Amino acid sequence: MRRRFIILALTAACCLLQVDFLFAQKKSKDKKTDKPATAAADTTKTKKVTIKEKVKSCHKLPGLFTLYQDTVSGSVQLFLKKKQLGKEFIYQSFSMGGPPELFLNQNMIRETWIFSIKKTFDKIEFIKSNTNFYYDPANAISKAANVDVSEAIFYSEKLVAEDTSGYLIAADGLFISEKLDQIKPNVPPTLPPGAILNLGSLNTSKSSYLKIRSYPNNTDVVVSLAYENPAPVKFGGKDITDARYVQVKMQHSFIEVPHNDYKPRYDDPRVGYFMQEVNDLTATEVASYKDVINRWHLKKKDPSAALSEPVEPITWWVENTTPVEIRQTIVDAGLKWNEAFEKAGFKNAVVMKIMPDTAKWDPADIRYNVIRWVSSDLGYAIGPSFVNPRTGQILGADITIDFGLLFGTALEEDLYQAFGGQHFEAINNHNTMCSIAKGLQLQQGSGYTVLEANNASAEDMQRLRDQFLSFLILHEMGHTMGLNHNMKSSQMLSPQELNNKEITRKLGVSGSVMDYPTINLASDKSKQGDFYTTKTGPYDWWAIEFGYTPLEPSKEKAELSKILARSTDPKLTFGNDADITFQGRGIDPRVMVWDMSNDMVTYAEERFNVVNKTMLLLKDRFTREGKSYEGLRQKYNMLRGQRFGMASGLSHYIGGIYVDRSFPEQKSVNKPLTPVPADYQKKAMKVLSKYVFAPNAFDSDTQLFPYLQLQRRGFNFFGYTEDPKPQQNVLNLQADVLNFILNPETMKRVNNTSLYGNTYSSALIVQDLISAIFDADMSGSVNIYRQNIQTELVQKLAAVVNDTQDQYDNASSAAAYSSLTSLNARLKVAALGDAQTKAHRKNLSFLIDRALSKDRY
């Protein structure tokens, strides 16, 4: 072993000596002449790969940004000019097709922001800009602008090659990813599994480029992103082929920031524009905002003229997918916006064109504003625009409408969503989603039902369809002008004026096309007026005047003040999504969806009567040979929806507050906050008592129940019974009313307003509810509807009494306790009624005894 070690050591020593000898020999040669060594060193240098070599197998797409796409693999490289470093650009994303429940419908405008590009050593970095703050350059603090703003580097990539003019980088990681727009939503941990469609993980190997367009002022990249979820909990609707594999089409657009003389206009709370929120961090006064409204860059050809055509009008193209028979209706509707722009001094500001079938341009090209059509069973319409976030200048817009909306049909499960839940779920997404479509579809269906049941003429049916379509186009185009919703404008006319065509053809049915109004139906068909507003209204004219009137900088503030001073005009009343009353939200009942008139109580009572009369006609009118009863069932559901809308709207007047947002110098006759007069609250309660809570409130429906049969389609109602559920349907409606009136926020508001004018106390409200729901049948039998709502009321009042989370104030708890005590005494002496009624009353007494016996502390 020792001998073997010595041999190995000697061998190693010899090797080291040989290496030293060779190194010394090379060093000696280098000393004699430098030329051989220099030549050897040159041959070891890495030769730089040129951009030309890197893109030799690629198709070049020059434009704002030059892209190179490999003709074999499809991979994309991005060339950046050196002069583009440090400049700002606009990023805009569009969904071009995906699950609608994730707001990925075709042409949905999504992310809009500013970004810049910089080079850091051997990397290119893309940086998202923060546009939330303003610093007055005259203030020294502006030198510290954005020092505490966290920089967002959303993409970083090493250089592939460079030359004297710019840099080449790989771009697949930018476009085939979620770095630009997060597609997959963050699911709150509080939501149960399956509440939201889970796309799973992005599979880049299955994702691809669909289209690349690059022009001098914008570059568009359309991609198909493949998501995989091997074990989905939610499988989506019929639009999802297989929930394990979902494709989402996205368009990423890079846009050059416009360089023009556009002057931003600051927002005002009395008028409703979409806007860019900016906080002034160099101001000390309250509400130091520099919010700028979204609007188009309109300039007069003749600045001296009172009425002039614009240098560049807002041009719309009706896509060639539009059914031929409705194209002219759409064109005519769009042109009606010109009346509003005339108030701002512009003639022919809106131009409408029809896209030829031979057109070579792509409707998805952001340089064209297009009214696009799809055909699905989803029922939606969207009208978004995209802007320069620095200034609010609108750069482009598109409208997408679902063809299925025209026929007023909808799925049964959409019934209540369209009159409440769906809209309010969309509030937080109002910049990307206008949810008028589903509700308007049901309004349209209700109109068809009432007209057909009353043997309306073909001309009236066509007028209804044309007015519906005109209103829908006007509404969505209004969004593209920068206007947000005005859910208060349906207050303009009285119930008596609504069917006076001399008035509605001059002013409209509503003060604005930006509302969500119920369909206007007359109880007497001989007096039927316009079903929808088919022209821009006084509020729209005023809003466009405020937003678009060209003004000299020195006179702008004074002139805008004159315009805004008119906000106290009842025809110009305004309230948007944030003001809408809903459970726990909003306070002004006049800011509501699917309502109508400045006297909602009178209007709702008339609508209840229309519904009840029409119910009696449905069976004979919609039972047809060769057809199942599903058509009858759908017509019935449309009328149920009308009841729901009216009842919901009325309930919001109880405990409501009228809001006036005028400024002190306007000297409004109204206070900023005025409780709804007690007499009007009681009037609303009386109508609810008669048409929602009374024992005979739903008698007109009874004859229909045996015929409300679903059409079997394979196994479509497997797992549940197919018979109609009238008691549950009625209770849903009644409980919705109770849920609002007895909501803790409503009850606290009732008691708070008692300190500044309200005399309809929580005790009186609860007493009136008990009277409405118990008095009529206390001395006799109680039908199943009333048993349900009586039990519901007792349970809700018991919950108020035993509130352990301090949601209710003391006055509300006292009102509930007192009323339950009195009611229990009455129940225990009520001896009359059938066996079911007696059992029902014993159960109510048990529930009350249990609630009152609990230790409230």
Image (cartoon, grey):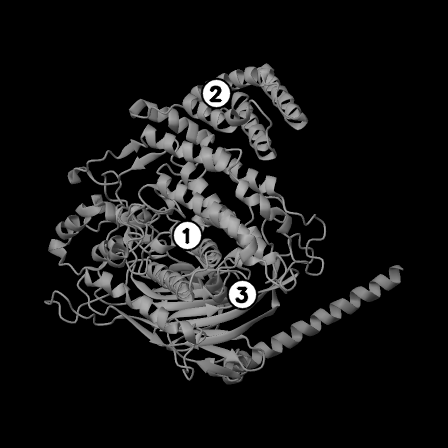
Give the number of callouts. 3
Regarding mark 2 in the picture, which secondary structure is present there?
helix
Estimate the x, y position of residue 233 in percent, counting from the top left.
66, 52
| Residue depicted at x 87% and y 59% | 2
Residue that numbered label 2 is attached to: 813
| Quarter location, residue 350 | bottom left
| Residue depicted at x 17% and y 63% | 345
Q: Are marks 2 and 3 in contact (CB under 8 Å)?
A: no
Mark 1 or 2, which is nearer the eye?
2
Label 1 to label 2: alpha-carbon separation: 37 Å
Type of amino acid at the residue the image marks with label 3: Ser
Q: Is residue 230 above or below residue 688?
A: below
Estimate the x, y position of residue 134 in percent, counting from the top left.
27, 50
Residue that numbered label 1 is attached to: 430
Regarding mark 1 in the picture, which secondary structure is present there?
loop
Type of amino acid at the residue the image marks with label 1: His
Between residues 177 and 125, which one lies in front from this camera angle?
177
| Quarter location, residue 110 | bottom left
Q: Is residue 589 above or below residue 138?
A: above
